[in-house]
Amino acid sequence: MVLLPRNVFAQVQRRAFSASAANAYKVAVLGAAGGIGQPLSLLLKLNQKVTDLALYDLRGAPGVAADVSHVPTNSTVAGYLPDNGGLEKTLTGAEVVLIPAGVPRKPGMTRDDLFNTNASIVRDLAKAAAEFAPKAFILVIANPVNSTVPIVAEVYKSKGVYDPKRLFGVTTLDVLRASRFISEVKGTDPNQEPVTVVGGHSGVTIVPLLSQSNHPEISGETLDALVHRIQFGGDEVVKAKDGAGSATLSMAQAAARFADSLLSSISGTPVTEPTFVDSPLFKDEGIDFFSSQVTLGPSGAEQIHPLGKLNEYEEKLIEAAKVDLKKNIAKGVKFVAENP
Ligand SMILES: NC(=O)C1=CN([C@@H]2O[C@H](COP(=O)(O)OP(=O)(O)OC[C@H]3O[C@@H](n4cnc5c(N)ncnc54)[C@H](O)[C@@H]3O)[C@@H](O)[C@H]2O)C=CC1
Ligand SMILES: O=C([O-])CC(=O)C(=O)O
């Protein structure tokens, strides 16, 4: 099953009529005062399944919390700083934890260039989550996702609380971009253009499976350009923001959508969409994490789907993706081994 991109306003309306006591979750955002964290917090405030929103940042989270708390939906909102046990209070009782904390790129940088700064941020937040919310679903946004997700896994393993079904790298923005960009090529409605995007979340590790889309006929230079745009869509935003960061608004929408899919799924309405998870697909090649279509359910990543039929062009993209992914994953694992 392929999930159609959905319009967030339609979602909000639909939820207003479907919320019930069973759909009541505490959701925590770590890095809530940042470029992604703020609009993400707003979108989560609008989600009727979120009844308790806990916002944490090194600075600014109480202000963001006070601001979004005035949005008239039925959730409580609290903002915390590191003092007075703020991280513990944020995490305790949380069912879902989103991690956008970390520095964004500037022009000329790759996502891997963020590793030195973000690896320790994610490691430390993962340690806290392992202690205060060991059963929560963890949604990692901080880059480089290909390495930060393995970092969380290693921290959880070291604490004896790792459940691979509960850890997700958020790759939804690649999926949204693919729908949008293919619709621009074809002059169609992006909401009707589902595209499966697999692999990882950086450059050539992002692999759109256009042969499985509505437009398997796209070929030649049009195909090359479209694939390149999906793989390097993040660079367009980094360049346009000219030193002021990377995608924040579209990313907030992507993360809010993935969080909603997960909340729907744990509430009993399973959703299938691509996400970067501990995956059996290429483990025999030493690649422990891979993004593919995943059916979500009460226990998290319940079914990891194979890639399906690929054409020769896509087989080559997958081979290239695997080379980088393997290195990115190993880098995260090594970091935690050397810097526990
Ligand atoms: N997965 C994806 O598709 C995407 C990922 N990203 C990544 O998301 C991350 C955040 O991006 P932005 O929000 O634009 O950055 P930002 O700099 O605007 O915000 C980051 C926030 O994290 C906070 N922070 C830093 N260390 C922290 C810690 N130890 N605990 C709590 N909060 C902490 C900062 O105070 C700041 O408010 C970056 O690493 C970026 O590369 C960005 C776009 C898409
Ligand atoms: O490009 C970046 O650095 C941020 C990101 O991950 C994206 O926009 O896909």
Image (spheres, grey):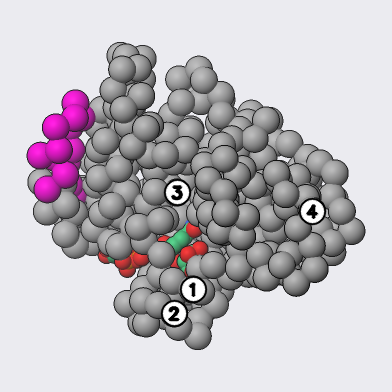
Q: Which residue is drawn at 53% across and 45% down?
A: 189
Q: Mark 1 points at which residue?
A: 236
Q: Distance between the residues labelled 3 and 1?
A: 17 Å
Q: How far apart are marks 3 and 2 (CA)?
A: 20 Å
The residues colored magenta run 67-80
For residue 258, above or below residue 317: above
Amino acid, disc 3: Ala
Which corner quadrant holds the N terminus?
top right
- Element type where label 3 sits in the image: helix
| Badge 2 density bin: few <14, some 14–19, many ≥20, Cα 10 Å | some
Amino acid, disc 1: Glu
Q: How far apart are marks 3 and 4 (CA)?
A: 27 Å
Q: Residue at x 57, y 49 (%)?
A: 188
Disc number placed over residue 217 in the picture, else none = 4
Disc number placed over residue 239 in the picture, else none = 2
Disc number placed over residue 254 in the picture, else none = 3
- Element type where label 4 sits in the image: loop
Q: Which of 218 and 229 is in front in this view?
A: 218
Q: Which residue is drawn at 57% across and 40% down?
A: 192
User: Could you tell which of marks 3 and 1 lies nearer the N-terminus?
Assistant: 1
For residue 193, above or below residue 248: above
Residue 45 coordinates in the image, percent (x, y): 25, 38
User: Could you tell which of marks 3 and 4 lies nearer the N-terminus?
Assistant: 4
Q: Distance between the residues labelled 1 and 4?
A: 26 Å
